[in-house]
Amino acid sequence: MAWRARPESLKLVAAKIRKQNWERQKQDGLDYVTVGDFAWYDHVLGTSLLLGHVPQRHNNGFPDLDTLFRIGRGQSQTDCGCAGEAASDMTKWFNTNYHYIVPEFSSDDQFKVSWTQLFDEINEAQQQGHQVKPVLLGPLSYLYLGKEVEQGFDRLSLLPRLLTAYQAIFAKFEKLGIEWVQVDEPILALELEKPWLESFKLAYQVIRSDVKVLLATYFDSVVDSLDAIVDLEVDGLHIDVVAAPKQLDEVVHRLPSDWVLSAGIINGRNVWRANLHSALHTLKPIKRELGERLWVASSCSLLHSPVNVELETKLPQGTENWFSFAKQKVSEVSWLAKALDGNEQAIEHCAQYSQPILDRGRSTWVNKPHVQSRVATLVSTNGDRSAPYAERAHHQQEVLKLPKLPTTTIGSFPQTAEVRKSRAAFKRGDIGVAEYESLMKDFIKDTVKRQEATGLDVLVHGEAERNDMVEYFAENLSGFQTTEFGWVQSYGSRCVKPAIVVADIERDKSITVDWSTYAQSLTDKPMKGMLTGPVTILCWTFPREDVSRETIANQLAFALQDEVDALQQANINIIQIDEPAIREGLPLKKRDHKEYLNWAVKAFKVSAASARPETQIHTHMCYSEFNEIIESVAELDADVITIETSRSNMELLNAFEEFNYPNEIGPGVYDIHSPNIPNVEWIEQLIEKAARRIPVERLWVNPDCGLKTRNWEETEASLTNLVQAAKNLRERLL
Ligand code: GLN
Ligand code: ZN
């Protein structure tokens, strides 16, 4: 770990970034600069350290930066000279692709302010002459977002102890001369259980001090919680007007007369320039009513948005003014606030500042004749395959002749340095198409050979040509714009670079067919084609704001449907359509799940609808909370689904106890995130466990996820054991 050698230089770089960010906020005329948004890993883990709340196994008595990284990344045996320590669990932050380390709670937990980062940074900003507004994750959201690691205990019972620590934090704020603090309680936008909602009142009474509190919510409406919110001892409320515009009127109407309203009207989660013209129109009457009590803000933290669009030098002509990244969003907030204050120049600026894509009118997609006829077919068939699963399974067996408990992988194979180097050289233009293709074919050949040697039943080409499962399709379909530097944090130091949907999505050439058919030509075993599903592409890109997510998903689905058809025409008889993001797209409120799942399931089905009965459709998902969407997963009607299960020791399959999953399923038998090589007995035992819930005739044997982060040595050893386990089980169970 490079930072360990030079922690001091890491800290210097961090201080420089903070300084720049604060100066930028000041230049843009923001009244307060935010402190507390700088996280070494993620801000929930930062809060755990602030509160001195560190899992026992990582606690050496004095939490420091080392402790923080150990919790976030685990500790290998070579690092510590001990048995090694697993990283804490990580999960997605609401419906975003940003992750946080899950706090672990047990009944004897203590909280004590023991990490001075927040206060040091307040000092730092004040010394640079800024007026500071710290931001802090609120006590109830902190508790709610964690998990109990002790049976029969309710983490809400820790609240009194936790509040003592928050009192101490507020006392420090007072000493530092802080006027306002933003306390994030995003759980107020969920359908919160009564005991949690009712705990807010007491909590905010207890931490009341002379520092004013802006209670911040985002990602959905707080109208459900409004009765409780307006009763709290706080001084203002931030709401997300982009995600839930309808709440604005009601919140204004019911806002206590001495509260500030922070209207989050600049979208923190997308890259389109704001429509300042209409934002001004929306806020003007509220400004008349609230005067100084109306604040203007981004809808949520700007960490969900890339940094600076000025760095993009390769955007097509005419689109330079379409986008707005974090830096530009700060200016948008500032222009809007000035315009609301009656500044003539700002009013003029806002009048002319709108979303360019809207100028081109609404999507013309649905009106195109070829689309109309496809939509009509879709309505009449409901996206169903032409035959039910049982019949398809019969046809597929005739074509594929697979053994029982077939073995396969999830798609990617090690992305070695050579693989990445070849792709980069092609991208830079250092090598031409012919050379690139021949290099990729070599990788495919090698991958196929190694799979044959391990004895796998269904092979894959290995995905060497893909840098990222979504960006690859975005680059090859029309309707997307990719960026050079549009990075957004996913977890720790890992970032993703989502593409932007800028027009109707269409497939004007085949994408994967050549690679898959080449791979198939090298072997007699069935070759599985590999696609990323419509919902996952949608969730991991920046969508347009002038067409619905459903429309974009449908456009993607039709494009993929054509790719499925082209693959089967080229004799690829198994096609996997990955949907690892389908769960992440769930709306925050359960009552909205159904509507989302309806169109998401439909989009998946549409993408697979061209498959003939004898073409076997696989899908893949990798996360553990699966139970709440299990029925929708079944509705996808994929012939085979491969899922992550090994980390939970097949617990995930409990969902299948009550729910009889009708088709075939491959519960992942080893965790690809770990370098450990699973032994044969371990794999057998997991599959036997699975066989108690799912008939063995419908079980597959495969790893948890793609193998691109592993090396060949680990991969071959693991897969050899996997194949051996399947062979042993065939003898024993069948
Ligand atoms: N097919 C992809 C791979 O194997 C799936 C990745 C994922 O599920 N995130 O890498
Ligand atoms: Zn996966």
Image (cartoon, helix red, strand yellow):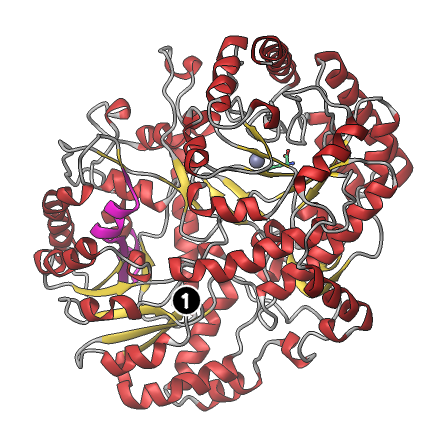
In this figure, which residue is indicated by the disc labeled 1? 299
**Picture coordinates of residue 721, whole percent (x, y):** 60, 11
Q: What residue sits 67% from the left and 31% below the top?
A: 412
Residue 125 belongs to the span the image colors magenta: yes
Q: Is any atom of residue 165 visible in this view?
A: yes
Q: Does residue 373 appear left or right of residue 127 in this picture?
A: right
Check the image and report above or below for 597 versus 113: below
**Picture coordinates of residue 375, whole percent (x, y):** 72, 66
Q: What residue sits 63% from the left and 59% below the top?
A: 553
The image quadrant that residue 181 belongs to is bottom left
Q: Does residue 720 appear left or right of residue 183 in this picture?
A: right
Q: Does residue 186 appear left or right of residue 706 in this picture?
A: left
Q: Is any atom of residue 307 visible in this view?
A: no
Nearer to the camera, 104 or 382:
382
The image quadrant that residue 353 belongs to is bottom right
Label 1 SS: loop
